Image: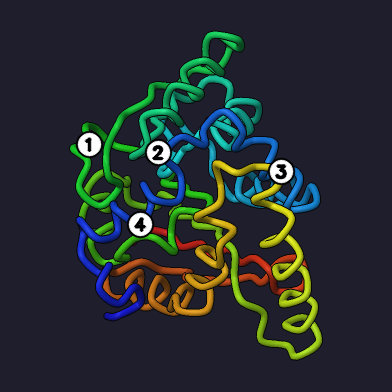
Amino acid sequence: MDTYGRNDTIIGREGLVRSFFSGTGKSYDRVVRMFTLGLDDRWKGEIVRLVPDSRRILDLGCGTGILTERLAMTHPRAEIVGVDITPDYLAEYEERLRRKPWIHARPMLGNAETVSLEGEFDAVVSSYLIKYVDADLLLNNTTPHLRRGGAFIAHDFTLPTDPIYLNSWRAYTWAINRIGPMLFPEFRTVFDDGLTGLLRRTRWPDDVMRALRDHGYEEVRYRRLSFQTAGLVSAVRA
């Protein structure tokens, strides 16, 4: 698998994520709202809608806790474990928990592919993580902790395949890659064709669906969202 070229190792993928996101935690929520034109809220809702009744939920690549908060609103009795590799994002996550003590969550610093997990979860979810990981390594690490019948749900940006949508996507990303660094210079690496370049190279969602089937998951499904600019994969552990 050469999705990331020389970055296709655990260390290389970690380095890519750190180069994108180190030092950006405080402005991340504003960037997401602004540059997804508010669609992030809708996409998070699509994830939450697929989560079954749960006692424990694993939120991989939890970032500042946007998805964790949405999960807590619909599953108020669930314990949520949020995993992220970037310390300043987990600091924002913890601040969210302090401001909103009704969220029953616990942050963990670690790589989703290798983090040491304990116990069993009813759902494993992620938003904007899956394009950065090796799907097989991720499932090797998480499947033993997902109960049988539990849900695996992954959402991320996608490159449109419809020519009209693709041309619109190219025009929009061209614009934000120029405006973004002026408004949020800490995100320069992301806007400097970093994210859009990755989306042109990634094999998500195909690799993820293949890996889910290889690991014995059932009901593997993929939905395109918002003019094919995002996608959602869901599956059930057999």
Which sits earlier in the primary sequence, circle 4 or circle 3? 4
Using a 10 Å C-alpha cutoff, classify the residue at mark 1 as few (fewer than 14 neighbours), some (14 to 19) or many (20 or more). Answer: some
Please tell me whether residue 166 is drawn above or below residue 74 in the rendered image.
below
Which residue position holds label 3? 183
Location of mark 1 (residue): 117
Label 4 element class: helix
For the C terminus, the image quarter is: bottom left
Q: Please state if 56 lies on the left or on the right of 167 as rendered.
A: left
> What's the coloring here?
rainbow
Q: Position of residue 67 (x, y in %)?
A: 58, 37
Could you tell me if the residues under marks 2 and 3 are in contact, i.e. CB atoms within 8 Å? no
Q: What residue type is labelled 2?
A: Leu
4 vs 1, front mark: 4
Q: Mark 2 points at which residue?
A: 58
Residue at 63% x, 70% y: name it: 223
Q: Check contact, mark 2 vs mark 1: CB within 8 A.
A: yes
Q: Is mark 2 on a helix, strand or loop?
A: strand
> What residue lies at 29% left-to-right and 36% top-to-bottom?
120
In the shown orientation, is residue 188 left or right of residue 202? Answer: right
> Closest to the observer: 187 or 205?
187
Please tell me whether mark 2 or mark 3 is closer to you in this view.
Answer: 3
Report the disc number at residue 16: 4
Nearest to the observer: residue 118 or residue 184: 184
The answer to whether 171 is drawn above or below residue 183 in the figure is: below
Closer to viewer: mark 2 or mark 4: 4
Q: How far apart are marks 1 and 3 (CA)?
A: 38 Å
- Mark 1 or mark 3: which is in front? 3
